[in-house]
Image: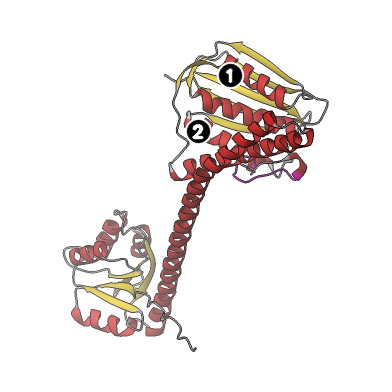
């Protein structure tokens, strides 16, 4: 069966504003510039030109310099003073002599060019065509950006819905795998159930990372619920938890000063867990991971995680970008969102996080967080 191509949507014409107090000049300029895809707007005064400029998106404006009440220079200054019209390309048209001081004044008010009467038609048409083409390109790029932004928003919305809906069947899998480990008598069945449980935990972490990414992108940041806490206790809990997960890793903690703060304990615990996990997985074996909480400053607390092994210089500026994963896949079982979520949590608390490669071949992640009110 033959199919007919869909008709293309016609582009709206580019608009050019002509400003002159002599109707015959407007008629002559219109005849030179009108054509397919070009709409000519005419104004007999500066005031009328201002009204048209505020009502329409203009690709170009040609202004007569010598006009009563408001000359072209005054009109240009008013156009440059408005956010909506300040980026319109302006070409001055004048019957005066080639006066350098007047030309300088024109460029100072925002003109891109001067044309002197009598105007050479081909010069005018060529100059105008350049600005018309630039405007079309700019409009096309803006439309493509809007389409891609909407596509990205829909994709992130889908990811958020999918991540949320996956939690229910995953929780059932985790519950049944735990039950199977307890009830099964066959060691091989218990081993397989334990593998299922571990895979479920990994999937749960990935889903939570996806949900955090969606919250950050769609909700303008990760939501937090601050309350009074002790940062030293969070550090201790992190070390205890990671020592259980990584029994062969050396994790050393150092807490100094006043560590009272008002943070979201779950989120800061997640921040510390991500940093320490990253340090253990990507640090060199046989060297300790050092986690430090410094409360010596009155306004902020500094959390530092240090491990042996420097991040390469080409990767260092991008470590907090989403979906950044290690070059060695065996050291990574996530989506590459861990450090991005650390950055988002720090930002949500009004703080910052930086990554540094030291001369002695160490990586230092430093989080600065205000104590909160």
| Label 2 neighbour load within 10 Å: few <14, some 14-19, many 20+ | some
Labels 2 and 1: the sequence-earlier one: 1
* Crowd tier of the residue under label 1, counting other residues whose Cα lies within 10 Å: few below 14, some 14–19, many 20 or above: some
Disc nearest the viewer among 2 and 1: 1
Q: Nearer the viewer, residue 280 or 71?
A: 280
Cα distance in 3D space between marks 2 and 1: 19 Å
In this rendering, the answer to whether 292 lies above or below 68 is above
- Report the magenta stretch's main SS: loop
Q: Secondary structure at mark 2?
A: helix
Q: Position of residue 366 (x, y in %)?
A: 62, 27
Q: Is residue 323 magenta?
A: yes
Residue 144, position as x, y percentages in the image = 46, 64
Depicted 35 relative to depicted 309: above or below: below
Q: Position of residue 61 (x, y in %)?
A: 32, 69
For disc 2, the marked residue is 347
* Residue 234 circle label: 1
In-image side of 114 versus 41 (left or right) = right
Q: Residue at x 68, y 30 (%)?
A: 183
Q: From where the camera sits, is residue 75 visible? A: yes
């Amino acid at each position: 069966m033959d199919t007919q191509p869909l008709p293309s949507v016609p582009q709206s014409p580019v608009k050019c504003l002509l400003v002159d107090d002599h109707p015959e000049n407007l008629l002559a300029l219109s005849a030179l510039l009108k054509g397919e895809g070009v709409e000519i707007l005419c104004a007999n005064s500066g005031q009328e030109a201002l009204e048209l400029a505020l009502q329409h998106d203009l690709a170009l404006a040609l202004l007569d310099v010598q006009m009563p009440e408001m000359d072209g220079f005054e009109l240009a200054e008013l156009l440059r003073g408005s956010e909506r019209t300040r980026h319109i390309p302006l070409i001055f048209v004048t019957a005066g002599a080639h006066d350098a001081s007047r030309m300088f004044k024109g460029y100072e008010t925002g003109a891109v060019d001067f044309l002197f009467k009598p105007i050479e038609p081909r010069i005018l048409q060529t100059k105008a065509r350049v600005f018309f083409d630039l405007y079309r390109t700019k409009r096309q790029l803006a439309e493509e950006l809007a389409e891609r932004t909407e596509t990205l928003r829909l994709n992130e919305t889908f990811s958020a819905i999918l991540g949320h809906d996956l939690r229910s069947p995953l929780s059932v899998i985790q519950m049944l795998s735990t039950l199977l480990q307890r009830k099964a008598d066959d060691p091989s069945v218990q081993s397989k159930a334990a593998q299922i449980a571990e895979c479920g935990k990994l999937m749960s972490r990935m889903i939570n990372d996806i949900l955090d990414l969606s919250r950050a992108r769609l909700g303008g940041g990760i939501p937090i619920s601050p309350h009074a806490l002790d940062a030293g206790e969070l550090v201790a809990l992190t070390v205890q938890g990671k020592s259980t997960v990584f029994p062969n890793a050396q994790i050393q903690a150092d807490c100094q000063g006043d560590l009272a703060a008002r943070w979201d304990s779950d989120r800061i615990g997640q921040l510390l867990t991500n940093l320490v996990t990253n340090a253990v997985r990507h640090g060199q074996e046989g060297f300790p991971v050092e986690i430090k909480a410094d409360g010596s400053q009155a306004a902020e607390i500094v959390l530092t995680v240090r491990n042996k092994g420097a991040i390469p210089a080409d990767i260092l500026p991008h470590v907090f970008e989403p979906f950044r994963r290690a070059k060695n896949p065996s050291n990574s079982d996530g989506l590459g969102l861990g450090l991005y979520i650390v950055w988002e949590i720090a930002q949500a608390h009004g703080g910052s996080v930086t990554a540094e490669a030291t001369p002695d071949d160490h990586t230092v992640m430093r989080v600065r967080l205000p104590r909160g009110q």
